[in-house]
């Protein structure tokens, strides 16, 4: 017997009726029609992002509307209806798996093929994969039942389904739809044959779009655009209904948002930042010649300039120039770490009006609250809260973003929240900072973005191995700046990079480094010591503190976020150069100092590390040349007792690089030249990505190569405070500390108010000045 209603979502408190399946499908189709229309820039840029030509826009729009209309058709089954109505029941098949199977029913397939202009395999792939939980085999294998049930009742003859198919017939210019007589899905030969037909179609599609043997690039582009479009349209239709917002009105406002002008970028970001720098330095500041000239290099640029040269202002100047060449409504500034993204927001994006600026990373909400409680000139008096009920959609109206690269580019690894942001990415210009620091997989995905998608991109760094430079220029089409062609701007930049800054004095051991750190500090110098592992950082900070009978700064990643913020501020303040007075300072840090700290040390001590990391560390010494042209910062280097976390090849390259540095007049230009000679070669990126090659199937992958070696945890003594914040629906990030998976400090009991991904650890293993301690140190 057919149920009276087919719900699409569970009923909310106070609602008389749940949202019907038919209405949700229609809402999603209409959201797609509005979002991706050719009538406005938002839709045009989404289509262009996927390199679909203008003459194919209507074909793309038809496909994404059809897929949106069909994406949840499989919810017309007994198990889903029972679950939505609150009856505990395992759904035998995932509803999107059923949706795709229905599209392979012989009578349905025969009907659909009457319009041969529509690529029904692209439609089916987008329907099957829209929840990113469909595989060829494994736990999420298409058509694999869950639990013990071997069948599920279908409601394909329900009036809601019939009316949806009538809507499809009109949309796809098909004749009258067939009456579907299937009443059950069963694990039997009939459905096995349907699934086999689906697998064959999936294999054919995968071959056709393969980066290796496939030749149908337009089809791959269409598939990618329709997949992303369905996910975004479904998110919009679902999220807006849940917040009682008018879908048409909200999306119309988003789609008709005016383009960013060059004047906006100048008045909202660049001019306030220049004025702030001028006030701090006591003199008027204008853009440097190279910062102006980089803006003239086109829409695909690789900016290579030394540490402290002013690359960030150059990037905003480039974005300003892009606004005169292309119509877009967003600027995305993407950083490799949370710390750098936060600093980028504080220094630049935060100058924009609060309704237009956004900070995006895993702990952004906490960082924003802290900024507003201690506002800078840029953030004073502002609020930055999007509508949290809309998740990623709440940020679609923002115009200036400072974000970790994961927040946007992880769509290439089928990460759902990033896929929801693809419409924003398509309507943007993109700046990617510190590309040298990307692990091989991240760099491969960056190359995939540059090769496969049409979006203006500026990549920048102080250092880049030759293999990566070739990948970005030869494979991905970026133009290098500065070029060999001389101009006043380039000559000025090269003069600054050629200024002698350092002298290299290698050491034999950590013990020798200890003596130099103590003597340099006692003589009034600012000493920064960088090691490769947290345990050594803590050990050295503790030992130095005992010798000096005063607290030595210790900064790494294994602090509670609130304490880490304090250590960050303390370290930056200790190395600040104010009013010509240099106060002695001593800090021991890990790799966190390479990018997210604006430090200016007189003496830099470091363990051997990959060559690009060494150059970044050296950039923390004599950074701003404020000690005068005759001053040289001392660089002490030594080999660590253990290679980890790096490998022998990386440290062998570092040894050769350091051996090539000589004399007391080392410049950033010399470091860059020697880096090209001594960096180990990397495999050439193939530009592949799960999102591009999945075909019918999609499951999320990892954006970063590094295996997650720690658990986010809460100290047992902080549980009461965390519970109170949870009750008040406030962020708890300040209490979260990364704890190594191998630690014995974990406690078995985890209270119910903690999110499932967090664990509890014994507070006796934690020190506010040293962070989470290894068992041997606690």
Image (cartoon, grey):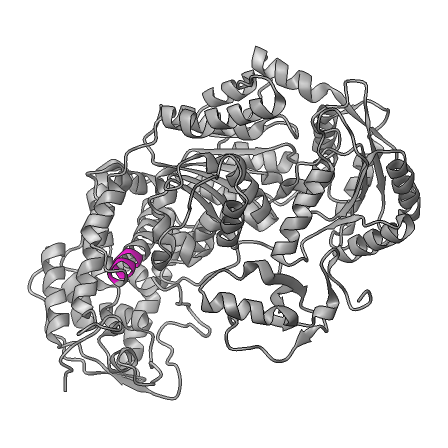
The residue closer to the viewer here, 427 or 14, is 14
Looking at the picture, does residue 639 appear above or below residue 281? below
Quarter holding the C terminus is bottom right
Q: Which residues are magenta?
A: 235-241
Main SS, magenta region, reads helix
From the viewer's perspective, is 745 left or right of 83?
right
> Can you tell which quarter of the image residue 776 is in?
bottom right
Residue at the image position 59 percent from the left and 12 percent from the top: 486
**What percent of the width, then of the height, locates residue 159?**
10, 74
**What percent of the width, then of the height, locates residue 261?**
34, 27
Does residue 479 appear in this view?
no
Looking at the picture, does residue 325 appear above or below residue 437? above
From the viewer's perspective, is 75 left or right of 463?
left
The residue closer to the viewer here, 708 or 356, is 356
From the viewer's perspective, is 134 left or right of 705?
left
Residue at the image position 89 percent from the left and 43 percent from the top: 513
**What percent of the width, then of the height, locates residue 130?**
34, 62
Quarter holding the N terminus is bottom left
**What percent of the width, then of the height, locates residue 398?**
37, 42
Residue at the image position 48 percent from the left and 39 percent from the top: 379
């Amino acid at each position: 017997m057919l149920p009276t209603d087919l719900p699409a979502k569970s009923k909310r408190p106070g609602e008389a009726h749940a949202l019907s399946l038919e209405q949700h499908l229609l809402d999603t189709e209409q959201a797609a029609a509005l979002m991706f229309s050719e009538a406005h820039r938002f839709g045009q840029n989404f289509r262009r992002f996927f390199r679909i030509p203008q003459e194919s826009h209507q074909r793309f729009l038809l496909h994404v509307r059809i897929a949106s209309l069909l994406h949840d058709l499989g919810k017309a089954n007994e198990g889903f209806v029972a679950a939505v109505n609150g009856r505990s029941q395992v759904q035998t098949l995932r509803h999107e798996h059923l949706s795709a199977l229905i599209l392979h029913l012989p009578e349905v397939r025969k009907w659909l093929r009457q319009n041969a202009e529509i690529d029904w395999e692209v439609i089916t792939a987008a329907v099957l994969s829209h929840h990113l939980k469909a595989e060829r085999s494994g736990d999420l294998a298409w058509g694999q039942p869950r639990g013990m049930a071997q069948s599920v009742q279908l409601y394909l003859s329900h009036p809601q389904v019939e009316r949806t198919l009538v809507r499809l017939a009109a949309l796809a210019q098909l004749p009258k739809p067939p009456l579907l007589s299937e009443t059950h899905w069963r694990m039997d030969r009939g459905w096995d044959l349907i699934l086999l037909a689906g697998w064959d179609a999936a294999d054919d599609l995968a071959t056709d779009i393969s980066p290796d043997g496939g030749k149908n690039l337009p089809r791959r582009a269409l598939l990618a655009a329709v997949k992303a479009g369905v996910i975004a349209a479904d998110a919009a239709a679902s999220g807006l209904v849940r917040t009682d917002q008018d879908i048409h009105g909200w999306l119309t406002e988003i789609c008709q948002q005016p383009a960013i002008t060059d004047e906006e970028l100048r008045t909202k970001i660049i001019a306030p930042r220049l004025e702030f720098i001028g006030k701090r330095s006591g003199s008027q500041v204008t853009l440097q010649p190279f910062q102006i000239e980089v803006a003239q290099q086109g829409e695909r640029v690789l900016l290579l300039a030394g540490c402290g040269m002013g690359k960030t202002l150059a990037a905003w100047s480039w974005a300003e120039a892009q606004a005169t060449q292309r119509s877009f409504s967003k600027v995305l500034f993407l950083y490799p770490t949370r710390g750098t993204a936060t600093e980028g927001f504080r220094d630049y994006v935060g100058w924009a009006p609060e309704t237009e600026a956004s900070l995006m990373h895993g702990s952004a909400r906490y960082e924003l609250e802290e900024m507003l409680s201690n506002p800078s000139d840029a953030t004073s008096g502002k609020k930055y809260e999007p509508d949290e009920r809309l998740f990623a959609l709440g940020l679609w109206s923002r115009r200036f973003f400072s974000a970790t690269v994961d927040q946007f580019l992880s769509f290439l690894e089928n990460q759902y929240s990033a896929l929801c942001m693809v419409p924003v990415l398509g309507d943007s210009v993109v700046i990617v900072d510190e590309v040298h620091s990307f692990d091989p997989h991240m760099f491969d995905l960056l190359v995939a973005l540059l090769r496969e998608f049409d979006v203006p991109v500026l990549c920048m760094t102080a250092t880049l191995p030759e293999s990566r430079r070739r990948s970005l220029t030869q494979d991905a089409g970026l133009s290098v700046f500065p070029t060999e062609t001389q101009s006043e701007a380039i000559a000025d930049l090269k003069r600054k990079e050629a200024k002698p800054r350092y002298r290299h004095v290698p050491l034999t051991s950590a013990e020798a480094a200890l003596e130099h750190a103590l003597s340099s500090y006692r003589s009034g110098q600012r000493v920064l010591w960088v090691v490769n592992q947290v345990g050594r950082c803590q050990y050295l900070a503790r030992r130095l503190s005992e010798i000096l009978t005063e607290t030595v700064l210790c900064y790494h990643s294994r602090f509670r976020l609130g304490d880490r913020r304090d250590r960050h501020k303390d370290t930056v303040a200790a190395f600040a150069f104010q009013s010509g007075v240099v106060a002695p300072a001593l800090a021991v840090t890990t790799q966190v100092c390479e990018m997210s700290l604006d430090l200016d040390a007189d003496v830099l001590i470091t363990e051997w590390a990959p060559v690009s990391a060494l150059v970044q560390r050296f950039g923390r010494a004599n950074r701003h040349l404020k000690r005068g042209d005759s001053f040289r910062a001392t660089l002490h280097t030594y080999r660590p007792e253990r290679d980890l976390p790096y490998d022998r090849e990386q440290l062998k390259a570092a040894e050769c690089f350091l051996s090539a540095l000589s004399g007391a007049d080392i410049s950033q230009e010399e470091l860059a030249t020697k880096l090209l000679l001594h960096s180990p070669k990397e495999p050439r990126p193939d530009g592949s990505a799960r999102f591009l090659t999945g075909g019918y199937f999609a499951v999320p992958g990892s954006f970063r190569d590094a295996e997650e070696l720690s658990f986010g945890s809460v100290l047992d003594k902080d549980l009461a405070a965390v519970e109170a914040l949870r009750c008040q629906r406030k962020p708890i990030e300040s209490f979260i500390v990364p704890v190594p998976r191998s630690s014995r400090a974990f406690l078995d009991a985890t209270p119910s108010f903690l999110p499932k991904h967090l664990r509890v650890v014994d507070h006796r293993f934690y020190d506010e000045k040293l962070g989470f301690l290894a068992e041997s140190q606690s």
